[in-house]
């Protein structure tokens, strides 16, 4: 965003601290781009980050920041950035529509391009917007670059309509997370650092835990064989794997052994364990904490039965899913994929470069699917 002579602000804290619009755009652009690099869409996310708050350059918004009596959200800014990005990239219509939707929706929920009755609600809003702000002259990506990146990511989707929907949600997830993360850090005056998981430590803990089982029986030998086979399979290429084990076969720890080996082998960022029922989840969480020696930062449970000691910490990390090991329900997982809400989709990008384990995928046979290395 080209800065005019006066300093444009993004936000004003109650204690008088300010964040300039340039600082905010720089932060959001950098984080959104980094998040999206994991699935090959860093430039698209960078563009979304640069345009998302362009409307805050409006004189009306700058005045709103200092108006103590102004109603929160009374000066709209998202639609202005959406109109600007649409106009700048309209020659590449796929790019223009995707980015405009992501930008105009970043404070609420993604919109449909077409309504049930065939109306183009998003385009109608864009055409009704007549506000103007300085153009994003500092953005160093061109429409052609974005189109090349879009085609590269889109080409691997077996179902193109679904692929377009998921790509839009992933870019949206990166933008929403980067925007809300910057706001949180500004308000809390904290800093952000990515903590890489220590898979070696967790594997060592698990191996020690498994070695403590001293009972010798036919069942124990079978469980050990399953566990060892999963460990060997963990070094295979990224893909979809299925394990069918009867009840009592030790699949919880065996599946985690596979996941830890797979994450270490391929440099993955987290393991997400999806379980259908709360009763099973609680039992699994207890077993995994005992086996991995996980503290509150290494293993995060996200479900309705949790009463956190630190609600602020819990909300931040369940919104983001940035812990090394996530234990959650199918409901939470499905909402994080198929919802249109920013609050649900914020964590979606953190499913990339992860191992996804679906426990009890076929309840009657006690199966799980491990989807290794998404993205």
Image: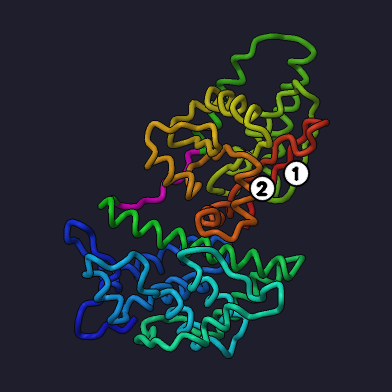
- Residue 95 counted in the magenta span: no
Q: Residue at x 53, y 65 (%)?
A: 172
Report helix, strand or loop for mark 1: strand
Report helix, strand or loop for mark 2: loop
Judging depth in this view, the residue of 198 and 293 nearest the camera is: 293
Who comes first in sequence, dot 1 or dot 2?
1
Q: Residue at x 77, y 36 (%)?
A: 243
Q: Residue at x 52, y 77 (%)?
A: 100
Q: Measured from the top left, where is residue 289 in percent x and y?
A: 53, 26
**Residue 372 — which label?**
2
Judging depth in this view, the residue of 131 and 267 nearest the camera is: 131
* Left-right relation of 13 to 25: left
Residue indicated by mark 1: 241
Judging depth in this view, the residue of 254 and 322 nearest the camera is: 322
Which residue of the protein is positioned furthest toward the right in this rendering? 364
Q: Measured from the top left, where is residue 234 in percent x and y?
A: 67, 40
- Seen in the picture, residue 367 relative to 6 is either above or below; the reply is above
Which residue of the protein is positioned furthest toward the left in this rendering? 16
Quick one: label 2, few (<14), some, or many (20+) residues within 10 Å?
many
**What's drawn in magenta, residue-wise?**
191-198
Give how far apart the Cα atoms at labels 1 and 2 are. 8 Å
**Quadrant placement of the N terminus:** bottom left
Quick one: label 1, few (<14), some, or many (20+) residues within 10 Å?
some
- Seen in the picture, residue 20 relative to 296 is either above or below; the reply is below
Find out whether the residues at labels 1 and 2 contact each other: C-beta distance under 8 Å.
yes
The majority secondary structure of the magenta stretch comes to loop
* Left-right relation of 347 to 259: left
Q: Quadrant of residue 134?
A: bottom left
Q: Measured from the top left, where is residue 333 in percent x and y?
A: 62, 47
**Quadrant placement of the C terminus:** bottom right
Q: Residue at x 67, y 74 (%)?
A: 115
């Amino acid at each position: 965003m080209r800065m005019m002579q006066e300093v444009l602000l993004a936000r004003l804290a109650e204690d008088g601290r300010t964040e300039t619009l340039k600082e905010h755009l720089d932060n959001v652009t950098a984080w959104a781009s980094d998040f999206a690099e994991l699935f090959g869409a860093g430039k698209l996310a960078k563009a979304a980050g640069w345009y998302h708050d362009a409307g805050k350059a409006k004189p009306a918004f700058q005045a709103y920041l200092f108006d103590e009596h102004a109603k929160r959200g009374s000066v709209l800014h998202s639609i202005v950035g959406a109109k600007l990005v649409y106009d700048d990239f309209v020659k590449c219509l796929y790019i223009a529509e995707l980015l405009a939707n992501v930008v105009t929706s970043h404070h609420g929920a993604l919109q449909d391009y077409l309504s049930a009755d065939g109306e183009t609600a998003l385009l109608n809003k864009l055409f009704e917007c007549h506000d103007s702000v300085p153009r994003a002259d500092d953005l160093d990506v061109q429409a052609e670059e974005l189109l090349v990146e879009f085609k590269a990511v889109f080409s691997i989707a077996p179902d193109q309509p679904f692929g377009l929907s998921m790509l839009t949600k992933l870019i949206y997830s990166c933008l929403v997370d980067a925007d809300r993360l910057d706001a949180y850090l500004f308000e809390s005056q904290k800093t952000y650092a990515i903590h890489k998981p220590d898979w070696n430590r967790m594997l060592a803990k698990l191996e020690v835990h498994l070695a403590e089982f001293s009972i010798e029986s036919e069942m124990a030998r079978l469980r050990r064989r399953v566990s060892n086979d999963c460990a060997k399979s963990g070094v295979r290429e990224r893909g979809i794997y299925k394990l069918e084990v009867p009840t009592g076969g030790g699949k919880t720890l065996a599946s985690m052994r596979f996941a830890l080996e797979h994450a270490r082998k391929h440099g993955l960022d987290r393991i997400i364990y999806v379980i259908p029922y709360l009763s099973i989840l609680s039992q699994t969480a207890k077993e995994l904490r005992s086996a991995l020696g996980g503290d509150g930062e290494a293993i995060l449970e996200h479900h309705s039965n949790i009463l956190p000691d630190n609600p602020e910490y819990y909300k931040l990390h369940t919104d983001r899913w940035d812990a090394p090991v996530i234990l959650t329900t199918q409901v939470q997982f499905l909402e994080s994929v198929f919802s249109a809400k920013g609050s649900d989709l914020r964590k979606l990008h953190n499913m990339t470069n992860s191992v996804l384990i679906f426990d009890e995928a076929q309840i009657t046979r006690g199966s799980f699917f491990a989807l290794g290395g998404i993205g």
